[in-house]
Image (spheres, helix red, strand yellow):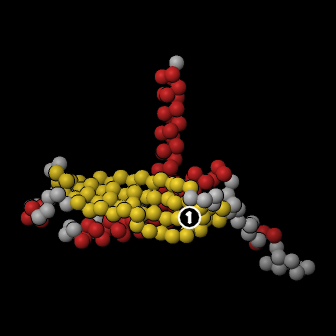
Amino acid sequence: MTGANGDQDNATQAPPLAGQLAIQKIYAKDISFEAPQSPHAFLQKLNPTIDVQLNNQATRLDEEVHEVVLTVTVTVRSEDKPLYVVEVQQAGIFTVAGFPPEHLGPILATACPNVLFPYAREAVSDLVIRGGYPPLLLAPVNFDALYAQELKRRQQEVPSHAEQAH
């Protein structure tokens, strides 16, 4: 909105961005599919259970450049026998600049995995289909909540280690 003197109204001006998160590269770092029960599993009526494990790791490559690797491991079992195991390490190189130092950890643990997860989900689904099994579509993940849980877990570990030292 323009005021009487031609200046923009302060209420409509957005504050300048504090930092920048830029994707430099997204790539598959490691992919694995194992189906130890094939082909017998295809001839049986199955009642599968699914276990999904997520992990992410960040490595500093340069002052403002980081590699983040999101590892998704899916184990599908029927009657305690593994039907298949899929592991995808989806990686990205990110430039993270201009943020306060205390924001770096949360950015690498939440924003970057949020970028990588759709690629990992697609790779898992594609591998499962190529393995001869019905499509497996992973549910969206709240990386903010996972990060908060991890911080809480770490805070609870610290007092227990301190108690053991006394």
Rendered position, 160 above or below 48: above
Image location of residue 43, percent across then percent down: 8, 64
Q: Please identify the residue farthest to the front as the structure is shown.
A: 62
Residue 32 falls in image quadrant: bottom left
Q: Nearer the viewer, residue 34 or 81?
A: 34
Residue 138 appears in the picture as rendered: no
Mark 1 Cα within 10 Å, few/some/many (few <14, many 20+)? many
- Seen as rendered, the residue at the extreme right is 5
Element assignment for label 1: strand
- 42, 30: nearer the viewer: 30
Q: Residue at x 36, y 69 (%)?
A: 122
Residue beneath the point at 45% across and 63% down: 91
Instruction: Give the quadrant of residue 44.
Output: bottom left
Task: Check the image and report above or below for 46 versus 3.
Answer: above
Q: Nearer the viewer, residue 86 or 16?
A: 86
Instruction: State the residue position of label 1.
Output: 94
Q: In front here: 120 or 146?
A: 120
Give above or below for 54 relative to 151. below
Q: How many marks?
A: 1
Question: On the picture, is 44 further left or further right than 32?
Answer: left
The x and y percentages for residue 142 are 46, 57
Q: Position of residue 137 (x, y in %)?
A: 32, 66
Amino acid type at mark 1: Phe
Residue 33 position, x and y percent, is: 26, 62
Residue depicted at x 23% and y 60%? 34
Residue 120 appears left or right of 96: left
The furthest residue to the top: 166
Q: Say which residue appears at 48% left-offset and 22% top-offset.
A: 164
Q: Is residue 153 visible?
A: yes
